[in-house]
Image (cartoon, helix red, strand yellow):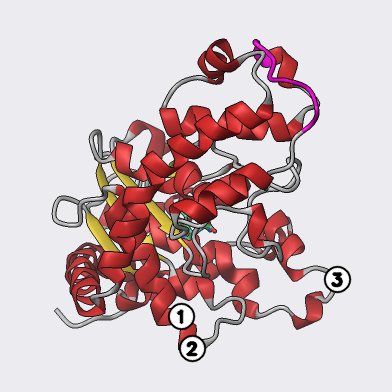
Amino acid sequence: MAASDRQAFPERVFSGVQPTGNLHLGNYLGAIKRFVQLQERFDCIYCVVDMHAITTWQDPKELAGQIREVTAAFIAAGIEPEKHIVFNQSQVAEHAELAWVFNCIARLGWLNRMTQFKEKAGKDRENASVGLYAYPTLMAADILAYKATHVPVGEDQKQHLELTRDIAQKFNNDYADSIRAHGHGDAFFPLTEPLIGGPAARVMSLRDGTKKMSKSDPSDYSRINLTDDADAVAQKIRKAKTDPEPLPSEEKGLESRPEADNLVGIYAALADVPKADVLRDHGGAQFSAFKGALVDLSVAKMGPIGSEMKRLTADPGHIDRILAEGADRARGMARETMAAVKDIVGFVRPR
Ligand code: TRP
C-alpha cells in the first residue's frame, strides 16, 4: 500500500471546464449538473481552464467571452461562488509553476501513451503545440495545487486522472526523505480519485447516436446549446434522428438503437430518474409523442439556466469580480502548496 493511501487528506473536489465556446447539453448533464450536486458533500473548486484552452488556437477576440460564458453557466446552474471557489486558471500563476515541476516528474513514456493527445494532434503530430502534449501535467497541477481528493470527470479524462496519480505517487516517492524532513509526513500529495458516472455522463449527437454531442460538430442541429431559446430547443428535438420503431418498455430494447437510447438517456438525466422509469412511463409511445414530452421537459429544466446565463453575461464586470475573488482564495491555497513544493525540491526562497 502506498504511503498516500495510509495518510488521510481532507476531502476536496476540483474540476475544470475548457472555455472553448458553445456550451451544450452534454457539458451540462455530463459535468456541470454533477458539480452542483457535489457542493452538498464536499468543498469544491471549479476552474475555467483557459490555459488548457490555448493548447489549441483560440481567437483572442472570443476567449474572454468564452471564459465568462462558462462562469455564467456554472452560476446559472447553481454553483455557489461564495461557499465554494470559482475562478479562471490563468489568474493563479501557481498552476503553471507547479506544472513545470511535474514536467520534470512525468516521463516521456507516460505522456506518449495519452490517447487524447493522439486524437487531438491527429496525423499532423509534428505541428501540434508543445502545450497540447504537456496538457496532462498542467491538469495534474490544477488538481494537486489544492491536494484535491476527488475529481468529477467524463470517461475521456480517466487516463489523465491516472497520470495525475502517477505523478503524485512518483513525487511522493522521489522526494520521500525531503517530504518527511520538512514535516509533511509520509506523503505530500493525495492519490486523487475520479468521480465518474451519473445518469447521462455521455450525451450523444442528436444527428448521430454513436457520436458524442460536440461543440465542433458542423451541424448546430446536433446539439442543444445552453443559450438556445425554447423554439430552437423544440426544433432541434423534433428534427433529432430516430428509428421507425416505437419506444421499448425495457432498457434491453434500447440495445443497437443508439438514437432512441440517447433521447431516453437525456430525458432520464433531465428528470433525475433511471432510464427504466422513463421506459415504464413512455414504452410503446411513438417518437413524435415522446419528443413532445422531451421538449417540454428540456424547456422547463434548461430554459431558466439559459436565461440566467444571458442575464449574467450582460454584466461582464460582475462576472469578472466573481472570478477575481475566486482567484484570490484559490491563490492563497495554491501558494501554500507551491511554497512547500519549493522547500521539498530544494529551491531557495525568501523567508
Ligand atoms: N481536461 C479536462 C477536459 O477537457 C479539463 C480539465 C483541465 C480538468 N484541468 C482539469 C478537469 C482538472 C478536471 C480536473 O474536460
Is residue 149 among the parts visible in the rendering?
A: no
Q: Residues within 10 Å of mark 2 (few under 14, many from 20)?
A: few
Task: Name the amino acid, label 1.
Answer: Leu
Determine the secondary structure under disc 2.
Answer: helix
Image position, residue 89 (x, y; %): 37, 70
> Is mark 3 in CB contact (under 8 Å) with mark 1?
no
Q: Is mark 3 within 8 Å of ligand 1?
A: no
* 24 relative position to 107: left or right: left
Labels 1 & 2 near each other (Cβ < 8 A) = yes
Q: Which residue was labeled with disc 2?
A: 60
Magenta segment's dominant SS is: loop
How far across and how far down the image is residue 329, in percent? 17, 65
Residue range of the region highlighted in magenta in the rendering? 243-251
Q: How far apart are marks 1 and 2 (CA)?
A: 5 Å
> Which amino acid lies under the numbered mark 2 shown in the image of this protein?
Pro
Mark 1, Cα crowd under 10 Å, few <14 / some 14-19 / many 20+, is some
Front one among 282 and 212? 282
Residue at the far bottom in the pictured view: 61
Q: Residue at x 47, y 69 (%)?
A: 19
- Relative depth, front residue between 47 and 79: 79
For mark 3, what is the residue?
123
Residue that mark 1 sits on: 63
Residue at 48% from the left image edge and 32% from the top image edge: 269
Left or right: where 34 falls relative to 199: left
